[in-house]
Image: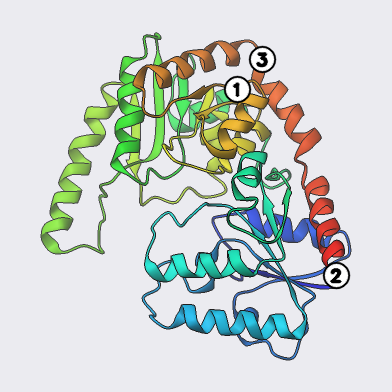
Amino acid sequence: MKILIVFREGKSDNLFVNTLCKGISDKGIDITCSVDKFWNDNNTFYDIIHFQWPEEIAGWSTQEADIANRFESRVNELKKRGSKFIYTRHNIRPHYSGEITSRIYDIIEQTADTVVHMGNFSKKESEGKLYNARNVVIPHHIYENTYNENITKDQARKELGIDSDKYVITAFGKFRHMDEVKMILSAFVSLDIKNKYLLAPRLLPFSPCANNKSIVKRIISKLAFVISVPVLKAINISGGSNENIISDEDLPLYIAASDIIMVQRKRILNSGNVPLGFLFGKVVAGPDTGNVGELLRQTGNPVFNPELKESITKAMKEGYKLSASGKGETNRMFAYRNYAIDKISAMYIDEYKLLV
């Protein structure tokens, strides 16, 4: 049995596919990750072609008008050869939607033989509405043995220059929209906990090196960044540019330094930050939407209504109490028991075998 996961070759800042591919390969399955082989390999028959993010098909900012038509033709060609398609549904629709990318989503949704959902919310939402495929639930796996999980909170805070007595709320994902920035900042400012501290390394829509903008926009962006950072620091907020990419080496510092992890989204289906926070033994708070809300409620972690500042502040307070009571360690044990890569890889292999 030969499997092709349609995902870029080489190193990526998103570890989902690379760790899953390794987990499946370690169980003796012949599996390859490649976008190029999807388009150009006509000499190898793949029993299963496994799609992840449809954006990978054409590049994340494609302007190639005909690529959706070429993609549909390629899908039909591979179907005729006998390949089966699996689609892991990470998003309902693309974050930065355009006609081309949306059509690629449609084609994958309409032609998949099996759709994998990361929670029952997504499965129930899809059945009978979006897909004619078999719909199954396979949770998001954890990235054990990938990061330095042994770094202590004190070590991480020393590295980041954070006092040991701070209550640290960390939102380490990229803030994609200004309403996410406003949502978290307004709730944090309203939080009446002594020594509160917000760690948000990808908070600001400004950059000190915005080289991809016009001269005027570069000047404005740099000036806004230079002004914003000290102003935020004065109110116990450490905010960096959302253009920053946190390296695999630095990411454990941000998580280990935290008391709770915030999923700073208003609209979301899945978030890898939930199992990542659990892996490091942290309390995780997030919006009561999609599979994220379902998982957080199931595990007794704080959820909030993203439209209500009071609800977000309340979740921050609840996270403070849960963190002090050892809830993070409970999350860690739950994650290893339910989301270990060995277990999740076996679930995917079962689905592959069922299709073949």
- Counting from the top left corner in percent of width and height, residue 155 is at 57, 28
Q: Name the residue under label 3.
A: 326
Q: Mark 2 points at which residue?
A: 356
CA–CA distance in space, label 2 to label 3:
45 Å
- Counting from the top left corner in percent of width and height, residue 131 is at 63, 59
Q: Which amino acid does label 3 sit on?
A: Gly
What numbered label is drawn on residue 288? Answer: none
CA–CA distance in space, label 2 to label 1:
39 Å
| The C terminus sits in image quarter | bottom right
Horizontally, residue 164 falls left or right of residue 213, namely right
Q: Earlier in the sequence, mark 2 or mark 1?
A: 1
| The N terminus sits in image quarter | bottom right
The answer to whether residue 258 shows anywhere in this view is: no
Which residue is at 59% across, 14% downward? Answer: 322
Q: What element carries label 1?
A: loop
Q: In which quarter of the image is residue 160?
A: top left
Q: Name the residue under label 1.
A: 301
Q: Which amino acid does label 2 sit on?
A: Val
Q: Is mark 2 on a helix, strand or loop?
A: loop
Q: Earlier in the sequence, mark 2 or mark 3?
A: 3
Horizontally, residue 225 falls left or right of residue 304, namely left
Q: How crowded is mark 2: few (under 14 residues within 10 Å), some or many (20 or more)?
A: few
